[in-house]
Image (cartoon, rainbow, N blue to C red):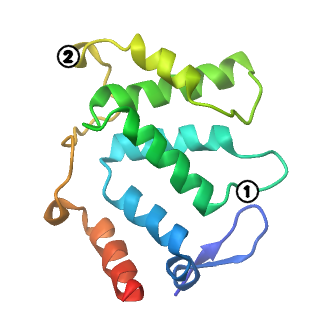
C-alpha cells in the first residue's frame, strides 16, 4: 500500500515495507498505543537524536523510545511535558545535536511541576494508558495491518 513520498529523498513510502521490518513494525505499534500528546512529544524528542547526515534507524528509534518510556512507567503527563520542554529548550539554546544521552531530559523531569500544574500540551486530554480496545480508529487500522504481517 503506497502511502506517500518521503519529503526529503522523494522515495515511495509503503506500509508493506514498514511492517515487514520488525523494528519498524514495533515502532508503529508503540506509537499507535501512546496518547496523542505523549506520542507527539516523544517524536519531537527522538528528532534530537537523529544524526545530521543520515536517518535514525528503526532499531535505534525503538531502543531510545523504550529507554524514555522506562523513565516514567506510568506515562504521566509530566513525561510528555518533560519531552516537549527538553526538545524546545535544546533547540532554543542551539545545543549540540544529535544528543547522546537522556541526562538533560532527566534533569528536566526532576524539576517537573506537579501534574495539576502542568500546562496543557493538547486541548483534548487523553488517558494515561490506552487499553487495546481504546485505540483511535487510525491506530486500530495500523495495529491490524501490523498484526496481519506479524503472523
10 Å crowding of disc 1: few (<14), some (14-19), many (20+): few
Return the residue nearer the eye: 18 or 92.
18
Q: Mark 1 points at which residue?
A: 55
Asked whether, in this view, residue 48 is left or right of residue 114, the answer is right
Return the residue nearer the eye: 63 or 41.
63
Q: Residue at x 36, y 89 (%)?
A: 151
The percent coordinates of residue 33 (x first, y second) are 30, 57
Q: Residue at x 37, y 30 (%)?
A: 79
Q: Residue at x 76, y 61 (%)?
A: 8
Q: On the image, which quarter does residue 124 sit in?
A: top left
Return the residue nearer the eye: 22 or 145.
22
Asked whether, in this view, residue 5 is left or right of residue 135, the answer is right
Q: Which residue is drawn at 57% across and 23% down?
A: 103
Q: In this view, does 84 lie above or below 58?
A: above
Frontmost of labels 2 and 1 is 1
Q: Name the residue under label 2.
A: 116
Amino acid at each position: 500500500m503506497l502511502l506517500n513520498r518521503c519529503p526529503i529523498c522523494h522515495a515511495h513510502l509503503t506500509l508493506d515495507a514498514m511492517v515487514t521490518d520488525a523494528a519498524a513494525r514495533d515502532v508503529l505499534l508503540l506509537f499507535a498505543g501512546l496518547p496523542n500528546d505523549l506520542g507527539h512529544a516523544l517524536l519531537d524528542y527522538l528528532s534530537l537524536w537523529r544524526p545530521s547526515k543520515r536517518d535514525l534507524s528503526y532499531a535505534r528509534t525503538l531502543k531510545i523510545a523504550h529507554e524514555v518510556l522506562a523513565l516514567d512507567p506510568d506515562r504521566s503527563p509530566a513525561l510528555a511535558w518533560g519531552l516537549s520542554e527538553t526538545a524546545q529548550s535544546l533547540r532554543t539554546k542551539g545545543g549540540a545535536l544529535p544528543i547522546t544521552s537522556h541526562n538533560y531530559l532527566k534533569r528536566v523531569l526532576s524539576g517537573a511541576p506537579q501534574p495539576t500544574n502542568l500546562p496543557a500540551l493538547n486541548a483534548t486530554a487523553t488517558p494515561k494508558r490506552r487499553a487495546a480496545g481504546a485505540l483511535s480508529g487510525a491506530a486500530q487500522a495500523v495495529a491490524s495491518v501490523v498484526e496481519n504481517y506479524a503472523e
